[in-house]
Structure formats: structure tokens, C-alpha cells
Amino acid sequence: MRVFVAGGTGAIGRPLVDRLAGQGHQVTVFTRSERRVADLGLPRVTAAVGDALVPDDVMRAVHAAQPEVVINQLTNLPTTASPLAAARGFSRTNRLRTEASTTLVRAARAAGARRVVAQSIAFIYRPGPGVRTEADPLWTDGRGPLGQIGRSVAALESATLGADLPEGVVLRYGAFYGPGTYYARDGLFSRLVARRLLPVPGGGDGLFGFLHLSDAVGATVAALDGPAGIFNVVDDGPAPTAEWLPYLATLLGAKPPRSVPEALARLVAGKYSAYLLCDQPAVSNRRARTELGWVPEYPDWRAGLAATLA
């Protein structure tokens, strides 16, 4: 199969391209740096160089590749705790979701692709009690960065699902862990936890839906031929902040995280971080399991994190 991957050199892009090439697919990776594709060292992989925010670059690359499936894994998330870096990273990622996603779908349609598979997120549902399914609304009317992220994700999903052809598949991934992620030993969150700079706010009631990169890749490969629509892709057990933060500290050989009043965390950490740590609801993966036939290798975040950091 001819597969075009936008964002094929990032945390999920690298193992995804490796899996696709290993299965014999003809893969084109759209990137700003041809060297990053060459560094993958994979056969059957071609680099298409351009800027995802320049429509002509995207249209030209997709047309040249003539893919059957286009996979959108475009993000530009920050790798440091710097507020300026975070603002820039989230701003560019929001643009990629709103602008580049629309261009990719247009390019896929023009090139005759049959399907677009796009990366979305499972951690922007409206807070409140209960377990969220794909039928529940995203939190698009939050204030500040929360609303900006929610609206950009909704725009990506609308663009991906907005026409009969190409078929649209939206994968609402959980919080990635594994090599190259925030939860790797050298990742941003692990570094903060090791230095006791990521405290448990209040009761630590935010419920994280974790997802090992290999399981994210498995769901994406399943989406090449499975049914269209939206799928939550998270592991089986929601992880309360009050549980996973101390557990990660133990795995890292660090001291337990501090506890701080929730009001202080909301004031210092920012609205989105406070939402993640205090408010995000549990998410169901039932549809991905039953309709995509996806079975996670790491259904439990405790075993998965332990294996990752061993």
C-alpha cells in the first residue's frame, strides 16, 4: 500500500514508519528535514520535504506520492517547561491542526487517496463525572489555552470527517509514553518528577488515559483498513494523578512528589495543566477494541511504565 505520513519523524511517527515499512508498505514521509528521514535508515521510505503550513508544499508532495492513505501525525509540542516554549509549541500545533489538516485532506482528495487517518487527542473532553465515549463533546468553549486547544482539535476532526471521500478516521490518542515522550526517562515530565517540580494538586483527581507508543502504532495500522469514524485509543485503566505521579517517581528512583493546594496549582500551572492534573475525565476504549479489533499490548499503565523505564 502507498502511505503518506505527515509528521513521520516525531515520537509516534518514527515507530509508525518503521512498522509500515516492515510490513512492506511504500511509505512517503513529509518532513522539513530530509536528513531526519534518512536517519531512520529504513527501506521503502521516501522523503518529501516541505512546510506543512505552506499549502503548495503539501499539495505538491501528496500529488507526487499518489498515496492510497494519508496519515496526519503533525504536532510541534514543547520539550521544555519554559512558558515561552510551551506557548510557541501549542500555538504552532493549533495551526497545524486547523490549517495543515484541511490542506492535507484537500491534497488527499485531489490525489485520489481513499482514506485520511488523523491524530487527535483524548484529553480535551469536557470535565465532569462519568466515562467519556466518542459521542461526548470536546471542550471547545474553555477559557484561554483550553479553548484554543479544544477548538483546534475540533477543526482537525471536522476537516478529516467532512466528506465521503476520502474516508476519515480520527484517532483520539491518550497520553503517549515510551521512547521520545514526556514520560521517557529523559522526557519532560520525568525530569520534572525527578526534581520534585511536578506536585500533586489537591486530591489529584485528573484521570489520565495513558497509551504506549507501540499501542498507538498498532491502532494506527489497524485504521488503514478498518471502519471510518472516531476512536478513543487509550489503555484500559484510567490513571488518577494522585496514583501515577508517585508511581512514576518510584520508578525513577526519585523522592515522592510534593502536594500543593489545588487553588495554587490552578494559579501557577496554567489552565490546561490544571485541567489535566485535576479535572480530565476517564475515557473508554471500547469502540477501538470492538470495531477496529485493536488489542493493546500494554492495557495497564503501571506495567507499561515499569517496562518503559526498566
Image (cartoon, grey):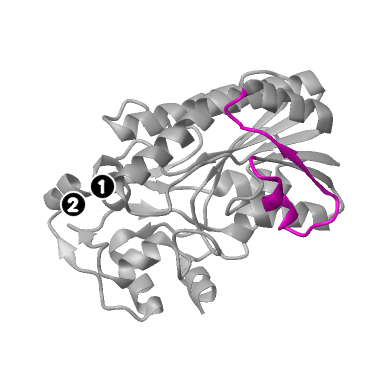
Q: Which residue is mark 2?
A: 265
Please tell me whether mark 2 sits on a helix, a strand or a loop.
helix
Does the magenta portion include 130? no
What range of the chain is rendered magenta?
32-54
What is the three-letter code of the residue carrying label 1? Ala
Which kind of residue does numbered mark 2 sit on?
Answer: Ala
Residue 28 image offset from top left, x and y in percent: 78, 41
Q: Which residue is found at the position 59% from the left and 28% from the top?
A: 101
Q: Nearer the viewer, residue 299 or 191?
A: 191
Query: Percent position (x, y) of residue 117?
Result: 67, 36
Measuring 72% from the left and 47% from the top, which residue is drawn there? 222
Which picture quadrant has residue 292? top right
**Left or right position of 176 against 101:** left
Say the numbered circle drawn on residue 274: 1
Give the position of the N terminus as an image quadrant.
top right
Q: Provide residue 130's location: percent of width, then percent of height.
A: 35, 44
244 displayed left or right of 169:
left
Nearest the camera: 119 or 196?
Answer: 196
Q: CA distance from mark 1 to mark 2?
A: 6 Å
Can residue 40 be seen here? The reply is yes
User: Is the residue 253 above or below the residue 170 in the image?
Assistant: below
